Amino acid sequence: MSALDLSGRTALVTGSAAGVGRGIALSLAEAGAAVAVHYHSSEAEATATAAEATERGAPEATTVQADVTDPDDVDAAFDAVEADLGTVDVLVNNVGDFEPTHWAEQSVADWRRVHETNLVGTMACARRALSGMRANEWGRIVNVGYSSSEKGLVAAKNFPYFAAKAGVLMFTRMLAAETQDDGVTVNAVSPYVVETSDEFPDDAPRGRWATVDDLANVVRFFCAEESEYVSGENVEVDGGWLPEDV
């Protein structure tokens, strides 16, 4: 496979002020994409990421604020990106809250927040991006799932997150089928525990946690011209982790 060249393309990565999203945005900048750094409340961090994106090779970079669960906010964010950088060619849906407590201790508001940031936000951003991608007959959508969600493995702790991520993977497969004649691919990358995570289990697969680059490399593969026939797939970036429970 040739080196990824996203010159002339615009990438929007949700939740890219810090963490995994930041790493993916910078990786796409290195491939020559103009980059839109999305944030909800971390404006200063988003500004710093956009500045680094231009240092890494992005011809242009901007920041955009939005609550991805609010369709009006999503529309306004895309309008702003299109005005500054052009049509969004690459969308990475990275936003997704979690709630690492027992399900019975969680409020209904917690359940709704986790469900909406992970699944509703992914849907709202993908839906808004599709018109431009279809018009250009080219697009790449990458959704962030969670390792084991495709297998239906769940636990009482953090249950709404597992359920929402299972929905994200179902949505990925459905949208891949619906866009097969549009020049658009839709895939997912599903980590287990990443170096930027808030909690760490006792044992790390292969003796370490996933790096941000481990995930970014999969996103880059999905974005490549040579990957145009790869759609509806989910790559678990978990070091070969084989859970009996989560």
Image (cartoon, rainbow, N blue to C red):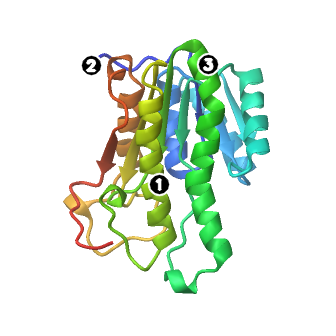
Among numbered discs 1 and 3, the one appearing first in the sequence? 3
Neighbours of disc 1 within 10 Å: few (<14), some (14-19), many (20+): some
Residue at x 60% of width, y 71% of height: 111
Q: Where, quadrant-wise, is the N terminus in this rendering?
A: top left
Q: Amino acid at mark 1?
A: Gly
The numbered mark at residue 207 is: none
Query: Which residue position holds label 2?
Result: 1
Hey, which quadrant is residue 200 in on the image? bottom left
Mark 1 or mark 3, whichever is nearer to me: 1
Foreground residue among 210 and 117: 117
Mark 1 or mark 2, whichever is nearer to me: 1
Q: Where, quadrant-wise, is the C terminus in this rendering?
A: bottom left
Rounded to the nearest angstrom, the CA distance separating label 1 from label 2 is: 31 Å
Neighbours of disc 2 within 10 Å: few (<14), some (14-19), many (20+): few
Q: Amino acid at mark 3?
A: Pro
Among numbered discs 3 and 2, the one appearing first in the sequence? 2
Rounded to the nearest angstrom, the CA distance separating label 1 from label 3 is: 35 Å
Among numbered discs 1 and 2, the one appearing first in the sequence? 2
The numbered mark at residue 167 is: 1
Query: Which residue position holds label 3?
Result: 59
Percent across and percent down for residue 61 are 66, 28
Neighbours of disc 3 within 10 Å: few (<14), some (14-19), many (20+): some
Residue at x 47% of width, y 54% of height: 167
Number of numbered discs present?
Answer: 3
